[in-house]
Amino acid sequence: MLLNKVILAIMKSIKNKNVTLQGETLSYDLPQRGENISHLAIGAHPDDVEIFAYNAIEACYQSKEKNFAAIICTNGSGAPKYGEYKNKSKDEIIQIRKMEQQKAAQLGQYSGLIHFNHESEVVKNKSDILLNDLKLLLDYFKPNYIFTHNPFDAHATHRYTLLACLKALKAIDHQAWLKGFFACEVWGSLDWLPSQFKYVLGENNSEELQKQLLNCFYSQNVGSQKRYDLGTVGRKQGNATFFESDQGNRYTHQSYAIDLLPVLNDSQHSLVEYCQQIVLAFQASVDKNLIDLQ
């Protein structure tokens, strides 16, 4: 599908809530404002962007100049079912998680919410459909900042979502509009990153809004007894406290990310090679500290 047709389809979708790209029906919601997106989060599952991209959500919240949007790649059907959701069917879980994500978008005043509605296996199988749709939408929105999962994440669908995002961006000829490409923490903290690779996403006194957003996902928190809401806020408070030992906190809450613009702009080195550089730098820092123990 040509890009101009995609733009027309997206604009039309503002009214009918659906747009067809590459044969896949997407849901496209605009809860509050227009489609001029400055901050875009691309998450694997419903509730992922509220965990890793809250910094972007808060930056755009009630702003007249900045707009946040989220792309959710899967329908969330593969989520473990706990507690009162243990006996829910797959279709029921899909609908519940989609409604929860829409509720969060309304509360957070997102300018756009796109559901790709894929199964996780589609993402992990490196689907051309997902890649092409991401490329078209990224080239259309041209966000200044993109937030997604990090390459060290323990969840395979998260890593493959990052890979699809990176490939889609590389397939776009010019990305002069992009100022930051942040790979953020969800399953596994990034506090171990060497300082030269660690990008701090910090907030002050913002706990209430983040809790409200995470509480939209009842099926993943209270209803499942998993409590991602408490874990997310707790980790960010811990990051802020243990970041530096010899001075006060810079922020009340902070998370970590890797800015992958160097990978995007370097045609000679791959994401894997960049990650290996990070691991080698971490090993060197550990070796340096171990000298004290000899």
Image (cartoon, rainbow, N blue to C red):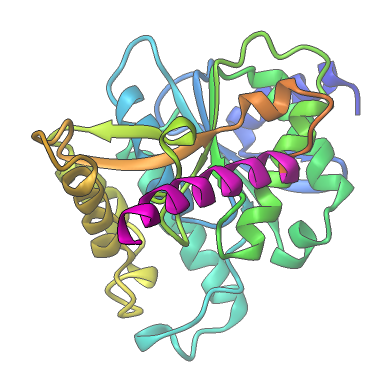
Q: Position of residue 35 (x, y in %)?
A: 55, 20
Q: Which quarter of the rendered picture does the C terminus lie within?
A: bottom left
Q: Please, is residue 260 above or below residue 117 in the view?
A: above
Q: Find the magenta span and give its range.
A: 272-294
How many numbered marks have been drawn onto this rendered protein structure?
0
Residue depicted at x 28% and y 61% = 229
Residue depicted at x 17% and y 30% = 250
Nearest the viewer among 178 and 49 is 178
**Residue 207 appears in view:** yes
Residue at the far left: name it. Answer: 248
Residue depicted at x 67% and y 50% = 161
Q: Which quarter of the rendered picture does the N terminus lie within?
A: top right
> Does residue 263 appear to the left or right of 258 in the view shown?
right
Magenta stretch: includes residue 35: no
**Residue 102 appears in view:** no
Magenta stretch: includes residue 277: yes
> Does residue 133 appear to the left or right of 282 in the view shown?
right
Q: Main secondary structure of the magenta part?
A: helix
